[in-house]
Image: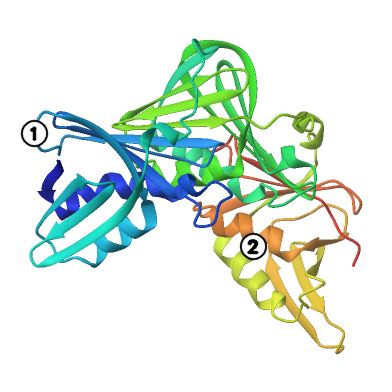
């Protein structure tokens, strides 16, 4: 039976959307496959890794029959990418999927669609709200850098999303730094907190566009669903108690000043050259309108940088992991950032000038002993 007869790019696009979460090596062989369902001319493509499920549809089916099968995602994707532009057809016969384009022909093994473990969706979601795609993408972009990667505290390997009133807040921390950002919505919501897995955040950043088209966000006690354009992403939530971010974000710091983001980043990149792989410490000394940055290593080499700042407070000598500072400065796009300090043993706060649209952004970095 012929499933698809269409232009190569029309088939490639939905496959690229769903294939991001497919693992090459998995304990369940079928998880390396994508589910293709045909109902007349409507084709749906579904992938899952048990934790996340992504589906999308395309009006590229051939004929009016119904059919469903699963095929290796990476192989099909690699074949389509390698084919020249032009018409491609997919046909199913004797448990084999035939991909044909011009004089190229490939036969792929299939597994039964009935064995594919689709994620069950709850009857109803607690909170339902809508955001423009670019707003949600911006929210995730601002805080994703602080997510832990393989922390034993599994709830840190993700992002906290807090819905309350007309505000949506995103928070991420790895225990050494914390990033916070908030945006407002049109609708009023009861307070709900969920922890989204790291992989979900990465996929959403890949799939979301910088457009005003809406994303429908639905939150349940153990699951979240994001629907936008022809894409639906369903994800399990991370169980656990996220740290109290409000206690971590300092307030009332008096030692505040603005600094050019690019100039600070370039100075940090230069002093970072003489730090070692194991010890990324950079010393920051503030006094009389001057910021001095320095680093040393085991070979007794030393780097020093000096920046002019509007600083008239008492002198301060504090150390930081230079990578944490570089991460946030690379991630931001603003011309200036605001630095706020307490004392040498307190965390530093990086925020954006109050007049900017991102005045709700905060980045907290713990000090380190130099």
47 to the left or right of 280: left
- Residue under the image location 35 percent in, 59 percent down: 75
Residue drawn 81% across the image and 73% down it: 278
Residue 353: quadrant of the picture: top right
- Distance (Cα) linking label 2 and label 1: 55 Å
Q: Position of residue 201 (x, y in %)?
A: 54, 42
Q: Is residue 137 visible?
A: yes
Residue corresponding to mark 1? 63
Quadrant of the image for the N terminus?
top left
Q: Nearer the viewer, residue 285 or 240?
A: 240
User: Circle 2 — which element?
Assistant: helix
Tell me if mark 2 has few (under 14), some (14-19) or many (20+) residues whose alpha carbon lies within 10 angstroms of its own: some
**Which of pointers 2 and 1 lies earlier in the amino acid sequence?**
1
Numbered disc in front, either 2 or 1: 1
Residue 357 visible at all: no
Residue 46 in percent (x, y) is at: 37, 37
Seen from the viewer's position, the closer of residues 279 and 228 is: 228
Query: Looking at the picture, does residue 370 appear above or below residue 173?
Result: below
Q: Is residue 178 above or below residue 170?
A: below
Q: Is residue 227 above or below residue 325?
A: above
Residue bearing the label numbered 2:
326
Residue 5 as seen in the image, left or right of residue 77: left
What residue lies at 50% left-to-right and 49% top-to-bottom?
A: 29
């Amino acid at each position: 039976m012929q499933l698809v007869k269409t232009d190569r790019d029309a088939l490639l696009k939905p496959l690229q959307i769903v294939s991001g979460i497919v693992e090459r090596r998995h304990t369940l062989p079928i998880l390396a496959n994508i589910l293709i369902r045909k109902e007349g001319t409507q084709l749906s493509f579904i992938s899952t890794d048990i934790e996340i499920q992504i589906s999308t549809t395309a009006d590229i089916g051939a004929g009016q029959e119904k059919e469903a099968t699963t095929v290796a995602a990476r192989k099909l994707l690699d074949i389509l990418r390698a084919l020249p532009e032009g018409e491609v057809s997919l046909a199913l016969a004797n448990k084999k999927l035939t991909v044909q384009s011009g004089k190229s022909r490939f036969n792929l093994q299939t597994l039964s669609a009935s064995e594919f473990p689709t994620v069950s969706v709850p009857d109803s979601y607690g909170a339902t709200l809508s955001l423009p795609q670019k707003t949600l993408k911006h929210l995730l972009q601002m805080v994703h850098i602080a997510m832990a990667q393989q922390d034993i505290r599994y709830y840190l390997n993700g992002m906290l999303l807090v819905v309350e009133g007309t505000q949506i807040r995103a928070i991420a921390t790895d225990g050494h730094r914390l990033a916070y950002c908030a945006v407002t919505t049109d609708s009023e919501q009861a307070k709900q907190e969920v922890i989204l897995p790291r992989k979900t955040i990465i996929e959403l950043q890949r799939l979301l566009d910088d457009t005003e088209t809406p994303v429908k966000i639905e939150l349940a006690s153990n699951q979240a669903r994001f629907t936008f354009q022809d894409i639906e992403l369903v994800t399990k939530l991370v169980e656990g108690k996220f740290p109290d971010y409000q206690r971590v974000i300092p307030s009332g710091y008096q030692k505040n000043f603005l600094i050019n983001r690019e100039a600070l980043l370039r100075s940090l990149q230069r002093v970072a050259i003489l730090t070692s792989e194991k010890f990324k410490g950079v010393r920051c000394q503030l006094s009389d309108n001057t910021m001095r940055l320095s680093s040393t290593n085991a070979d007794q080499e030393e780097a020093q940088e000096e920046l002019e700042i509007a600083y008239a407070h008492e002198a301060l000598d504090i150390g930081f992991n230079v990578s944490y500072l570089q991460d946030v400065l690379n991630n931001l796009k603003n011309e200036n950032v605001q630095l706020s300090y307490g004392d040498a043993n307190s965390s530093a706060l990086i925020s954006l000038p109050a007049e900017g649209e991102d005045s709700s952004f905060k980045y907290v970095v713990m000090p380190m002993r130099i």
